[in-house]
């Protein structure tokens, strides 16, 4: 009898494990379908120069939290803070899951022509997804900047200038064409710490937040 009871207990456990595995597999199969079904609504921007051109669709939104990093440099006869890199983490909308990191880096498709910078490519604003796919961008021409809040960094429209798959085939950012930075808070260079030549080399790491919308060419079936 003990053997039969033990055998029945083992059978029930195996059945329970099988059900859990089946549920997990079903969930994993369903996730890509859910992701494909999600739509990103483009933000309302107060000026047409921040509008993304027709034929592109918003497909990814990340909420950025980090710092705008400045260094005090000579400027004309005086000094001023100059941005040397943003440093931020982008999280999925309404989620604590990290999806992208944000910084400056050399763009390998553009040669470096700045003799004051040691780099293997032109320094561009950069986003890298968790799958290591990367996009480099520059501010939209003629001028994709707009000051919405005088106490925060500007809203931006940026053009992708290069994309790169991740080393294992990641493609999250491989098709990005434009990026919008909107809903900014903070991030402006401080008023003190860079007022005289004695301040040269001072750094300031200023907290900021922003929403980043990523666009790609609109799919033909949309």
Image: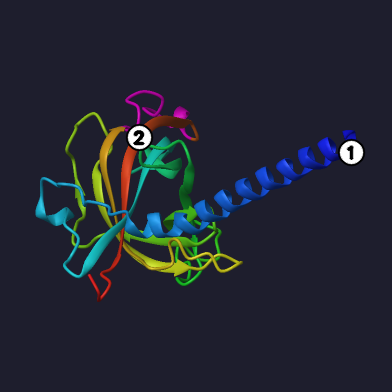
Q: Which picture quadrant has residue 94?
A: top left
Instruction: Classify 10 Å Cα crowding around label 1: few (below 14), some (14-19), many (20 and above).
Output: few
Asked if residue 193 is among those painted magenta in the image, a careful observer would answer yes
Residue underneath mark 1: 3
User: Is 13 on the left or on the right of 49, as rendered?
Assistant: right
Residue in the picture at 35% in, 27% down: 190
The residue sitting at the top extreme is 192
Question: In this rendering, does residue 73 appear at all?
Answer: yes
Q: Secondary structure at mark 1?
A: helix
Q: Give the image location of residue 155, x and y in percent.
A: 23, 44
Residue in the picture at 21% in, 49% down: 145
Q: Which picture quadrant has residue 25?
A: bottom right
Instruction: Decide: is 17 above or below 60.
Output: above
181, 117: nearer the viewer? 181
Residue underneath mark 2: 209
Q: Which mark lies nearer to you, 1 or 2?
A: 1
Residue in the picture at 27% in, 52% down: 40
- If the image is split into quadrants, where does the N terminus sit? top right
Q: Secondary structure at mark 2?
A: strand
Q: Give the image location of residue 125, x and y in percent.
A: 41, 54
Among numbered discs 1 and 2, the one appearing first in the sequence: 1
104, 111: nearer the viewer? 104
Instruction: Decide: is 86 above or below 109.
Output: above
Asked if residue 121 is among those painted magenta in the image, a careful observer would answer no
- If the image is split into quadrants, where does the C terminus sit? bottom left
216, 69: nearer the viewer? 216
Q: Give the image location of residue 185, x and y in percent.
A: 29, 32
Q: Which picture quadrant has residue 216?
A: bottom left
- Please give the range of residues in magenta: 186-200
């Amino acid at each position: 009898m003990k053997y039969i009871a033990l055998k029945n207990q083992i059978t029930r456990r195996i059945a329970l494990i099988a059900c859990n595995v089946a549920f997990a597999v079903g969930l994993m199969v369903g996730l890509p379908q859910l992701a494909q079904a999600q739509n990103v609504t483009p933000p309302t921007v107060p000026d047409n120069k921040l509008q993304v051109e027709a034929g592109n669709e918003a497909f990814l939104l990340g909420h950025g939290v980090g710092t705008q990093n400045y260094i005090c440099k000579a400027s004309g006869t005086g000094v001023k803070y100059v941005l040397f890199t943003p440093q931020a983490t982008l999280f999925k909308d309404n989620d604590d899951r990290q999806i992208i990191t944000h910084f400056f880096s050399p763009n390998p498709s553009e040669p470096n022509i700045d003799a004051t910078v040691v780099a293997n490519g032109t320094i561009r604003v950069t986003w890298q997804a968790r799958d290591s796919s990367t996009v480099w961008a520059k501010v939209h021409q003629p001028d994709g900047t707009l000051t919405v809040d005088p106490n925060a960094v500007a809203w931006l429209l940026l053009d992708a200038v290069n994309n790169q798959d991740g080393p294992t085939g990641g493609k999250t950012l491989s098709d990005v064409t434009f990026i919008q930075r909107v809903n900014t808070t903070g991030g402006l260079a401080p008023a003190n710490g860079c007022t005289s030549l004695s301040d040269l080399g001072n750094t300031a790491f200023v907290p900021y937040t922003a929403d980043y919308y990523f666009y790609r060419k609109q799919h033909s079936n949309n």
